[in-house]
Image (tube, helix red, strand yellow):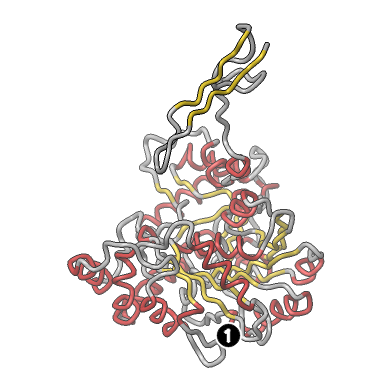
Amino acid sequence: MESYLIHMNGHGDHPAILDVHVNIGGSGPAPGKGKGRKPRWAVRASEMSKKTFNPIRAIVDSMRVEPNPKKPMISLSIGDPTVFRNLPTDDEVTRAVKEALDSGRYNGYAPSVGYQSCREVIAASYSCPEAPLKAQDVILTSGCSQAIELALAVLANPGQNILVPRPGFSLYKTLALSLGIEVKFYNLLPEKSWEIDLKHLESLVDEKTACLIVNNPSNPCGSVFSKSHLQKILAVASRQCIPILADEIYGDMVFADWKYEPIAVLSTNVPILSCGGLAKRWLVPGWRMGWILVHDRRDIFGNEIRDGLLRLSQRILGPCTLIQGALEHIMRHTPAEFYHNTLSFLKANADLCYTALCAVPGLRPIRPAGAMYLMVGIEMEHFPEFENDMEFTEQLIAEQSVFCLPATCFEYPGFFRVVITAPEEMMMEACARIQEFCEQHYQGSEVAQDLECDK
């Protein structure tokens, strides 16, 4: 068999007008088909998509349980302060967005890292003498979640590892595994109000460690690190020459008698990417406005990390321009009373929930100091009919229609997390139902329950 290719080219700007294979002998591959290839559909999901796994969704979706139809559902599982509609944002915040919309100036594309004026506003809001910031130190993102994703992507390569708190926010693992980055969990200590086990943390460091994630105030623990503890964390990072990714989305959401310290303020040499946003403090998680603050006074990141963040930000062309248009007014004109009232409400609910659950046999709540959460230990030996926190929380739904997340979602079995943003009367009802549930299933002595909670 012989084959000839007849190819007639056009002239000037005209394309080729004929491209024909002529087979002499009547055999050989059909036109348009590669040799030996039989066309077929073969569409497959990417390896990245296969590596992406959200443990909370997987666990919650696997809970095949129906709530008690005789009791209305009380869901204390989602870290969204808007769910119960009892915590609206301030009128100044919504007015800022309405004015931005009415102006007609924010309907187009902005620079991928955000408008320069908005970056200047954020820099001015978070700058201090110990940790100065300029506009070029700010990257605006589509929520704090994207800020964390960009920070991880710029600091770590596939095959490297990151150090992540346990218990901790599940998104760190979800993002890391999708990027081919290994996760190493360091322990938090419930008996020390969820401080980091620093010896355990440092023992995990190796030549492939790319960064340390520090979440303060904490989701899911509601804990707030003291200044001295943050300094000890920085000392570990300094000795090991590891940059820090600081998840500070709950920054300044701390209760009375506690103080929030941004970790960058205390750092003398450790470079830090601090991630934050409007979601929690301003009670608008759906507005998707976050940021990365680059703290690098020793120029350890240099231009490389900044350039990398710029390139990564160009993948989606930046966050919502409408919210950017409102950002200056939000940052400068939200009244202090709004922040105070939000924290007063959360503190009252935290105290209510902690006190109520302290009186419940077999439970060991850990008093929170901020954020929107409270972690409760389950003395599983006193609930022998349940194998783990998953079964415990499933049955709590089935009998009492109260939904709390099992702490297996946060890599910490034997606990459950309570979201404390519900209205006060709903929190009281939920705690009463939890008490009734535990009293029905508890086996063993109830002596010293109150003494344990007072520690």
Is 430 above or below relative to 235?
above
Mark 1 highlights which residue? Answer: 265
Q: Is residue 299 left or right of residue 11?
A: right
Q: Nearer the viewer, residue 297 or 61?
A: 297
Instruction: Count neighbours of disc 1 (C-alpha within 10 A) and say few if under 14, some if 14 to 19, many if 20 or more.
Output: some
- Position of residue 249 in the picture relative to residue 388 (left or right): left
Query: Dot 1 lies on which element?
Result: helix
Whole-percent x, y for residue 247 in the image: 56, 68
Q: Is residue 202 above or below residue 158?
A: below
User: Which residue is the extreme one toward the bottom?
Assistant: 129
Q: Residue at x 62, y 72 (%)?
A: 304
Tell me residue 242's x, y (percent): 72, 72
At 67% from the left and 52% from the top, the residue drawn is 445
Give the residue displayed 54% in from the left and 55% down from the top. 417
Residue 229 visible in rendering:
no
Could you say which is closer to the camera, residue 104 or residue 343? 104
Q: Nearer the viewer, residue 413 or 219?
A: 219
Based on the displayed image, in which of its 4 quarters is residue 295 positioned?
A: bottom right
Residue 31 in the image, given as x and y percentages of width and height: 55, 18
Residue that lies at the very extreme toward the front in this rendered image: 11
Q: Residue furthest top?
A: 26
Residue 11 visible, this orientation: yes
Residue located 57% across and 59% down the image: 375
User: Which quadrant of the figure contains the C terminus?
Assistant: bottom right
User: The residue under label 1 is which amino acid type?
Assistant: Val
